Image (cartoon, grey):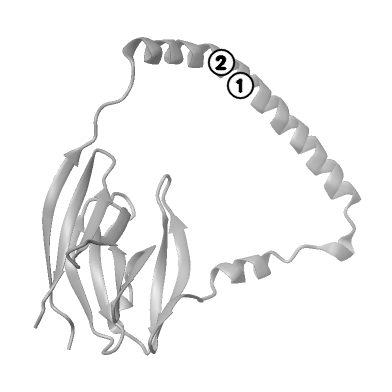
């Protein structure tokens, strides 16, 4: 039987606006001045690398060709993400979002249909006889679900839906409850997770 959890949002902390107006203006002016210089240096380096690439192709022997298909196979392999009790969870890399963690496909042994066809973050947390996972509802914006899988019965359950963050941290408090902290970029959300004592 899957353990019963109660989860509730306990705190919402807005992040302060940081920065000095005068310093920000100077930085903007400086970036406008430096931008053309960086552009010229970048173009010069690209031309230089292109020339080296042409010479490399001319002098590369045909017997030492690189197998591109072999590199592609490495991304299609399943690797173990984690293992607890008799449950093994495997990951397959699917991509990454700029300024965010990678997202993965997951499967398990023994097989769990709950994981099929869904996208997950690379975050997980062990708790007693289970594991918490981060399911992604979208790769375009932060929209995640908190999942718990019991590693003895292999049952899975969605504990909280539509959390607007992919940056998570979870800790056990002094009162033996769990606190999930989610950073949305604009505010910090704190969720209290209680396990039924029954």
- Residue 14 in picture, x, y percent from top left: 19, 37
Q: Is residue 174 visible?
A: yes
Q: Secondary structure at mark 1?
A: helix
**Residue 89 seen in this snapshot:** no
**Residue under pointer 1:** 38
Quadrant position of residue 149:
bottom left
Residue at 29%, 70% (x, y): give it: 132
Question: Where residue 181 is drawn, which disc sits there?
Answer: none
In percent of width and height, residue 96 lies at 44, 54
Q: Which residue is rendered at x = 29% and y = 89% of the image?
A: 152
Do the numbered discs 1 and 2 sit on residues whose CB atoms are within 8 Å?
Answer: yes
Q: Residues within 10 Å of mark 1 (few under 14, many from 20)?
A: few
What crowding class fits label 2: few (fewer than 14 Cα within 10 Å), some (14-19), or many (20 or more)?
Answer: few
Which quadrant is the N terminus positioned in?
bottom left
> 58 and 111: which one is in front?
111
Q: Is residue 51 above or below residue 110?
A: above
Q: Horizontal and vertical percent for residue 81?
A: 45, 73
- Between 150 and 164, the one lying in front of the other is 150
Q: What mark, if any, has residue 34 been given in the picture?
A: 2
Q: Determine whether, in the image, residue 96 is placed left or right of residue 173.
A: right
Residue at x-position 88% and y-position 47%? 58
Task: Give x and y (percent) for residue 95.
Answer: 46, 58
């Amino acid at each position: 039987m899957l353990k019963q959890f109660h989860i509730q949002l306990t705190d919402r902390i807005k992040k302060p606006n940081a920065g000095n107006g005068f310093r920000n203006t100077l930085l903007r002016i400086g970036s406008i001045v430096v931008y053309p210089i960086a552009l010229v240096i970048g173009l010069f380096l690209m031309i230089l690398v292109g020339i080296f690439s042409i010479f490399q192709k001319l002098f590369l022997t045909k017997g030492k060709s690189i197998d591109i298909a072999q590199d592609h196979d490495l991304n299609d392999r399943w690797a173990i993400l984690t293992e607890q009790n008799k449950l093994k969870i495997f990951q397959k890399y699917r991509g990454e979002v700029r300024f965010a963690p990678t997202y993965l496909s997951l499967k398990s042994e023994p097989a769990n249909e709950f994981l099929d066809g869904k996208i997950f973050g690379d975050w997980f947390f062990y708790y007693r006889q289970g594991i918490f996972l981060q399911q992604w509802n979208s790769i375009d914006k932060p929209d995640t679900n908190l999942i718990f899988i019991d590693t003895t019965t292999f049952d899975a359950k969605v504990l909280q839906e539509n959390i607007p963050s992919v940056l998570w941290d979870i800790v056990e408090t002094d009162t033996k409850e769990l606190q999930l902290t989610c950073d949305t970029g604009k505010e910090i959300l704190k969720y209290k997770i209680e396990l039924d004592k029954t």
